[in-house]
Amino acid sequence: VPGTNRRNPSRTRDTARPHAARRPLARATGAGPSGAGRAGRAQADFFFFLAEAIPVFFRRKALFVGAAALLSAGAASARPLAPGVFCQTYPDAPACAGGAVDCSTCHAGPPAFNPFGRQVADHLAPGAPRPLDDEAFRAALATALRAVERLDADGDGAENTTEIGRGSLPGDAASKPAAGAAGKYDDAYAHSKVLVDFCGRSATRDERAAFAAASDRKAALHDALGRCLRGEYWRGKNGAVWNLANPKIRPLSSLKGGEGAGPIPLADYDDDYALFVYTQIDDHDARDLLLARYYVARHDGEVTTYEPFERSALEDYAVRPGDGTSQTVDAGERAGMITTHWFRMINTMLTPMPRTTAAQAYRAYLGLDIALLQGLYPVPGEPRDYDNKGVGAPECAGCHATLDPLSYPFSRYEGIDTYDQGFPDVPSHYQPDRLARFVATDGPGIAETPERGFIFGQPVENLIEWARVAADSDEFAQALVLDYWQLVFGEPPRPDETPEYTNLWSRLKDAHAYSVDRMLHDLVATEAYGVP
Amino acid sequence: VSPERTPRARPAALAALGALAGAALALAACSNDDPAKPISLGRPSPAPTTAPTTTPPLVSAKGRVNFKGGRRYADDLARGLAVPRAELCRELSSFDCVDEVHNITLGGVDPYDAAIYRPSRERSVSTVNAVDRIALTACDGRAKRDFGDPDRAAIFGELARTAAAPTRAALVATANHLYAGLLGRDPNADEIDALVTFYGDLAAELGPSAAPARFATLSCYAVATSEEALFY
C-alpha cells in the first residue's frame, strides 16, 4: 500500500520525510525569520493546513487501501483489464467514447455484479480452472461479452447489444436506449444560448430582433460567438475558462504565493491559471497545456489580457523575488501545466515517488482516472517497487503496473522545496539526482528509479517526451472537448450525440490545429447545441 | 429582505406566477379593450371560452434545460431592472447575495478556500429560497427607486407618475417594460392579461392606494422567477 514503509511499517512517508524538507514547515510555524508578529497567525494557519492536508492524505490512502481490498476480494470478478477488453470488443460503443468504460457497466459497485455483469460472469470460461491469467481472462471476457449480446440482462426490453450500442446500461433497467432526438436546428435558439453560455448574459430584445432580421443568420451566430470569446466573462479572472482549470490546478489560498499570498506561501497558482487561459483562447495551440516552455502574465483591465514570457528560473526569481512567487524550473525541463511550481508543490509535496502527481496529470489532462481503473496500460515487469512500498503485491500491481512507470518521469522534479534546496542558489528544481537524498527513508532502491517511464504503454525518456505523447493523444483531445461540452450542456454527450462529440475532438486535432475557439464554432453548429 | 417587505398578497403572487408559466390563468383575459379606461377590480368572470391567443409551446426534442446559475441570473436581473449589480441584493446590507452568501447553492464554485471546483449539478433545497430572495429584493429595490423618483423611473414610471388608479395602458406598459428587461421580448396577450388580472386581485385586496407599488414589486417578481428567466 503506498505510503507505508514495508521494512518499517510504523513509518509513513510523511513521518519519514527528509530533515531538510521540514524547514519550510518550521518557518511556517513562526520559528523561522517570519517574525514574532506573524507567528501566531502563521501557526494557526499551519494547523489549518494540516487539518486540511491530513484528511486528504488519509482519504487518498484509504482509496488505495479500498481499491486493493476490492481487487483482492474480487480477483476473479473485478479485473483492471476488463474496461479495456470491453472497449476493444465494442470500440464504437458510446460508453467508450471518453476512453474507458465505466465500472457500472458490469458492477453494482465492485466487486458486486449487476445483472449484466452476472450474465457475463456466467459465460466467462465456464469450467476453466481459476484464477485465469491475464491473457486467458482477456480472451474469455471478449467471448463472454459476445455470448450474452442477444440477452436482456436487466429486463427492460432492450437487448444487451442494443444498449451497448446506444449508450445505455445493459445491467440497469432504469437506463434505457434513447430513442434519438428528432428536431430541427433553430438558429435563434442557438443564438440565445450562445450569449448565455459564452457572454454570460441573456440576449436583449434588440439583439434578438437584429438576429431575426440578419440576412445571414449563420454568420451572425458565429459573429456573436466570436465577440463572446473575446469578452471578460469568457476569458477574465474567475471567468468561464478560468474556472475550467479549478479541478486541474486544485488551488488552496492558504498556500498561495504572490498576489494575495496566504500564510504559507509555497507557490503561486495565478501562473497556472494564466497559462491555462492563454492556451484556450485566441486560436492558441491547446496542447501547450502540456508543452509550453513559457509562462504567462495576466493583465487585469476592462477585458483581461494575457502575455507570455520566457525566463529562466533565476531570471524569474530576479523579477519576482519572494516566497513562492516565481517559477523554479528552466525552460528545457518545462512541460506546461504539469511542471509549474504550484502543480509540483501541491501534488508531489514531499514524496520521492510522485504517483499522485502523475495520476493527477493523467486525470486532469487526459481524462483518465486510475483510481477508477481507467487508462490502464500495464507495463511488463512493473511495478518494480523502487521505494519499497509493497506495490508489487498482486492486489496492487493491477494499477501500479501502469501508475508507477507513468510516475518515473516526474521523479526528478522537486515538490515542496523552495527552502530546503536553497533556491535560488540551486538554480533549478529539476534535479537529475533528486532521489539520492531519499535513500535513508525509502531504501537504496529509490535511487535506482529510472527517469524513463511509460505512458499508454509507450516508453518515454523523460517528462518532456511524456508530455508530447500525452498532448498528441486522442485522450487529450477527448478530455479537452469534454470539458467544454460539459460546460455548455451540463452533462456528457448523450448516446445519440456521440458522433458529434467524436467529430469535435477529431477536428480539433486535424482541421483546427488545437484551437479551442475554432472547436467551439463547430460545437455551436451541432444539432446537440442547436436543436431545442 | 426585511419582514415588512414580505408581500401580504403571497397567494395572489403565486397565482400570477403560475399563470405566467402555464395556460390556466392565461384564459382569464380582461375584456377591457379601451386602454385609457380604468380597469375594474377583482377577477373577471366567467372564464372566457375562446381559444388562447398564444401559440402552444413547442415540444423540445432534447429536453435539455439548464439553470443559468447565480452569477448570470444576477447579471441579467441587474441589467433588466437597470440596477447596479453591486446594489442588486445584499444580505444584512453588507454581503452580496450571489457572490458571497448564496454562491454555492446558486451553482457557483469556491476553489480557493473550500475546494469546490465545479458547480453542483443538482440544485439544493435552498436554491429556490436564494432565488426568491434575490428576485424579490431586486424587484423591491427597483420599485422603491421608481416610486421614490418617478421622473427618473426605469420600469414602473407609468404606475408611479400618477396618484390615480392605473389604466390598462399603464399596466400594459409596465408588462412591456418587465418582459423586455427581464426576458428580452414582448409579452403576448395572455401574459399581459394575466398581469392585468393580477393587478385587479391586488387592488381588491390592498386598496387602490397601496396596490400600485405592491404590484410593481410582485409583477416584477413573477416575471423574474419564471422558468424562462431562470433557465435556458
Image (spheres, rainbow, N blue to C red):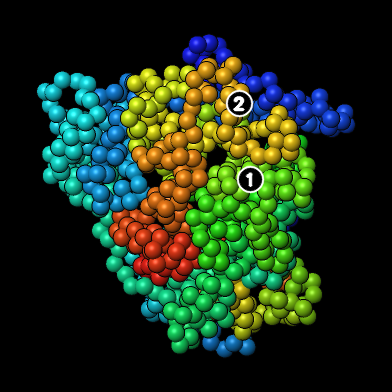
B15 or A257: which is nearer to us? A257
Please give the chain letter of the residue carrying mark 1.
A
Q: Is residue A333 left or right of residue A479?
A: right
Q: Quadrant of the N terminus of chain A?
A: top left
Amino acid type, mark 1 = Asp
User: What x and y, as percent, mark residue A116?
Assistant: 22, 37
Left or right relative to A139: residue A394: right
Which numbered circle lies on residue A330? 1
What residue appears at the point 63 percent right and 45 percent down from the top-left corner?
A330
Q: Horizontal and vertical percent for residue A161?
A: 18, 47
Numbered circle sitting on residue A54:
2
Q: Residue at x 44, y 30 (%)?
A: A404
Give the image quarter of residue B76: bottom right
Q: Can you say which quadrant of the picture contains the C terminus of chain A?
A: bottom left
Q: How many marks?
A: 2
Asked if residue B151 can be seen in this view, the reply is yes
Tell me if residue B175 comes above or below residue A523 in the rendering. below
In the image, residue A83 sits, relative to residue B69, either above or below, namely above
Q: Where, by quadrant of the figure, is residue A513 drawn? A: bottom left
Q: Is residue B167 above or below residue B215?
A: below
